[in-house]
Image (tube, rainbow, N blue to C red):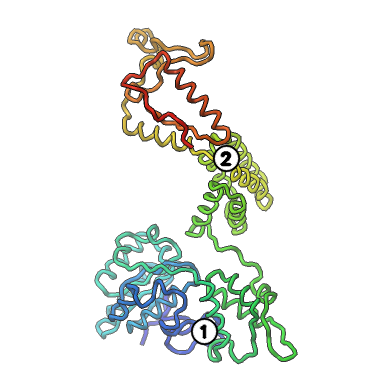
Amino acid sequence: MPPPERRGQRTLFDPGPPGGGEPAAQAPLAARMRPRTLGEFEGQEAAVGPDTALMRAVAAGEMPSLILWGPPGCGKTTLAGLLAQAWGARLVALSAVSAGVADVRRVVEEARAGARRGERTVLFLDEIHRFSRAQQDAILPHVENGVIRLVGATTENPSFEVNGALLSRCLVVRLAPLAPEAVARIVRRALEDDERGLGGRGIELTPEGERALVEAAAGDARVALGALEVAAAIAARGVDGRRRIGRAEVGAALMRRLPRHDRAGDAHYDTISAFIKSVRGSDADAAVYWLARLLEAGEDPLFVARRLVLLAAEDVGLADPSALPLAQAAYAATHAIGMPEAYLPLAEATLYLALAPKSNSAYTAYSRAREAALARPDEPVPLHLRNAPTALMRAAGYGQGYRYAHDEPDGVAPQRHLPEALADEVFYRPGGRGAEAALGERWRELRRRLREQAPPAGGARREDEGTHG
């Protein structure tokens, strides 16, 4: 007999395992329509196709420990059950949200007892990224000695969220959002299935309704089936007694669906990356679209405002020096008024930065200077630039020969300001766009004048002082 349920633990699936008994009639449609065999598992050919490493192992009667990485609704839980079934193993599922190390230890003890009877155990740990490093370490020895096979499911990048030692002992299987065609097939199967689905109930999904349903699901089979079930319940019967589900019924079933986004996981980083790269790429339409995706999904508007300040400094830079104060003003306005109105200054700043000429010369200049500073951190400050507040310092040559720029007729004192060993280094490479084109001309003239009476200390002048756009 299987052990009783404990906190955070369930045996097989609720309701019913794939291929193991019939799901309860009152269960949601998405649960009833879980695939019962690997042959029914839809839309993940790249992960579980016949030539993949995972399926070759299954065909050979093996079951590796796995990390299933993918978005919600792509089939991670279902695949874990199907693989355990194919291996002839008992599947015990834990959620890292509610379970702890003590629950894992109980599963391991039950697995040891089962192994003496010739039974196999697969531990399915949902949301494994919620386990701390120490909790993950507690699983490692049991994976190493083969007492259990681990299948960890995560929506987050396992490279960042799973301990390296545990990750190295698992096959990482990436599951993608289901393609629209796969979602459509799942929906049609549910409509046709008389036993588990909605078949035989006089329900018809119009082509427009199907397109709306598939589009709203965004690759999530659970969303598609859940909305289909609600739409079927609210659809009015026609004169022929059939319930027809169109775009209106799908919209009513879904109410309002937020874009797929969260403030801590991969979707957060992917969306903000798209936003940044659209602004940098001068695509105003894409930039404001990704801004809307971020804000409508509940992103902190001050986080977006901070990114705009950084974009102004890093990617617009000296090509339009007014971009940075404008971005700072957008940040201040966002802080002052908050959402929902803060979208206005954020949209204004986003569009301005996207349309502005671009230069990353401040970023690249600092990067070169930082590299030189780290490579040669002990280069002495030239004596003429040193402060000389005491007679002893003046006697040692501190400040000797320093020319005060404001005393020069044109405000430029031709003298060296870099350490002697770096005298001919060029860190700033002016861009040729926008306001920086004029700054570049002044930079070249100033370099010439600063060297008029101070020839290079160590050889000929470098030849790479031109414009770099």
Per the rendering, the mark at residue 133 is none
Position of residue 154 measured from the top left corner of the image (x, y, whole percent):
43, 66
Residue at 55% from the left image edge and 52% from the top image edge = 275
Kind of residue indicated by mark 1? Arg
Q: Is residue 45 above or below residue 304?
A: below
Residue at 51% from the left image edge and 83% from the top image edge = 33
| 253 or 407, nearer to the observer | 407
In the rendered image, which quarter is residue 386 located in? top left
Tell me: 333 left or right of 171: right
Position of residue 379 measured from the top left corner of the image (x, y, whole percent):
32, 25
| 257 or 125, nearer to the observer | 257
In the rendered image, which quarter is residue 229 located in? bottom right
Tell me: 343 left or right of 52: right
Per the rendering, the mark at residue 32 is 1
| 143 or 396, nearer to the observer | 396
Q: CA distance from mark 1 to mark 2?
A: 56 Å
Residue indicated by mark 2: 357
Q: Does dot 2 land on a helix, a strand or a loop?
A: loop
Residue at 33% from the left image edge and 68% from the top image edge = 171
Q: Is residue 133 above or below residue 197?
A: above
Residue at 44% from the left image edge and 34% from the top image edge = 365
Local crowd at mark 1 within 10 Å, few (<14), some, or many (≥20)?
A: many
Kind of residue indicated by mark 2? Pro
Q: Does dot 1 land on a helix, a strand or a loop?
A: helix
Which image quarter is the N terminus in? bottom left
User: Can the viewer see residue 251?
Assistant: yes
